[in-house]
Amino acid sequence: MLHYGPSAFLSRLSDPYWFQALGSVMGMDWHSSGITTSVVGALKRGLNPRAAELGLYVCGGRGRHSRNTPAELRAISETRGLDGEALVRTSRLAAKIDNNCIADGFQIYLHSFIVAANGEWAIVQQGLNDASGLARRYHWHSANVRDFVDEPHTGIAGAHQGTIMNLVDAHAAPAREALVSLAHAAPDTTLDVVRRLEMPRHHEVRAEDVDLKRLGGVLAAAYERDLKGFADLLLVENLGPRTLQTLAMVAEVVHGTPVRFSDPARFSFALGGKDGHPFPVPLKTYDESIAVLRSSLDKAKLDGGAKMEGFRRLDRFVKLIENRLEPRADFQAVLQHERAISSSLGGRTVMDGKRPKPHQLNLFELGS
């Protein structure tokens, strides 16, 4: 938000790979459908109190919260001078399309509508298949929607389940035309290729799920003595290697290009996963990373954004290491190391018998 503005943020939310990476860097299970609920909930709690300043509003959510979306959109529209009824219609239309026009066996139970002050929007929805217990996520962005009934999605994330009826697929144009002819209308047939993020059935993080060269670049910046010293200078912080590793991945989520998020599992190496995969969430690192980010944001107005610019430089630095040194992470060694130091970093999972008091702060309470 601070660097790229609401439009770029909406564009990223509509990319299922970036969204999955964002959830992973928060410490969520990289593979779990719970990422969607957690990310959307955190965004709503963190951004809405600063919506007047940021120009971005998060509406809807899971279950009963999704039913509040029309009222929330109308209230925002009245404040910002937008066409509230048009936004409400868009919200309902997207829900109907993903629930009814795509006969994939998934019923929508989460509907999130993120709208900017200028009326630009993104939609993130998730459906559940009761029979298989699997979830599927649907992403939209107003900038990409040329026709609601012809390839309107920016991405669909879910396991491949064979041939399904999808009336908004490009190849379904003849079927749509037959249906519309009954109503004496003709649909547009603009084509666009949809990207689908399909997660494997195994829950643990494996080496084949991760780009080991990219992970190697982050680890080299965090642990190699000479490189770590320079990386510290980029952020003007005396950071431990574990926190620097986390912040390097946060910097990539903020500044990385879409192609960087083809392996969202890699971002689970920032703060682990609450289920213990690839390792328990290191609470000390989590808290220290939040403190660095909060300090950088608090000082942004005083230093002209120099501290936050350090994260952009850190992202460039890691990419330079990848290209010039071509490091390659030893996947098993990384897992062994993380699990060995887990207890010293306050490592926790949801399976622990003794759970700490819930944190009152998360990455999205920063409003970044």
Image (cartoon, helix red, strand yellow):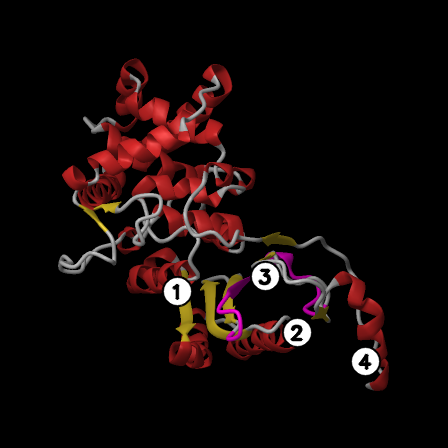
Labels 4, 3: front one: 4
Labels 1, 3: front one: 1
Sequence-first disc among 3 and 2:
2
State the separation of the CA atoms marked 1 and 2.
23 Å
Tell me the SS state at disc 1.
helix
Q: Nearer the viewer, residue 209 or 362?
A: 209
Sequence-first disc among 4 and 1:
1
Q: Nearer the viewer, residue 95 or 99?
A: 99
Sequence-first disc among 1 and 3:
1
Q: Tell me residue 146's x, y (percent).
A: 69, 62
Q: Tell me if 233 is positioned left or right of 150 in this view.
A: left
Residue 313 visible within the image: no
Q: Amino acid at mark 2?
A: Ala
| Quarter holding residue 92 | bottom right
State the separation of the CA atoms marked 3 and 2.
23 Å
Tell me the SS state at disc 3.
helix
Circles 3 and 2: CB atoms closer than 8 Å: no
Q: Amino acid at mark 1?
A: Thr
According to the picture, the residue beneath numbered tag 3 turns out to be 142
State the separation of the CA atoms marked 4 and 2.
16 Å
Q: Tell me residue 313's x, y (percent).
A: 38, 27
Magenta stretch: includes residue 134: yes
Q: For the magenta stretch, what is the residue range?
A: 130-149
Give the label on residue 103, or none: 2
- Identified at 45% across, 41% down, the residue is 206
According to the picture, the residue beneath numbered tag 4 turns out to be 179
Q: Nearer the viewer, residue 183 or 245?
A: 245
Q: Against 343, is 231 above or below?
A: above
Give the label on residue 37, or none: 1
Sequence-first disc among 1 and 2:
1
Q: Tell me residue 250's x, y (percent).
A: 36, 40
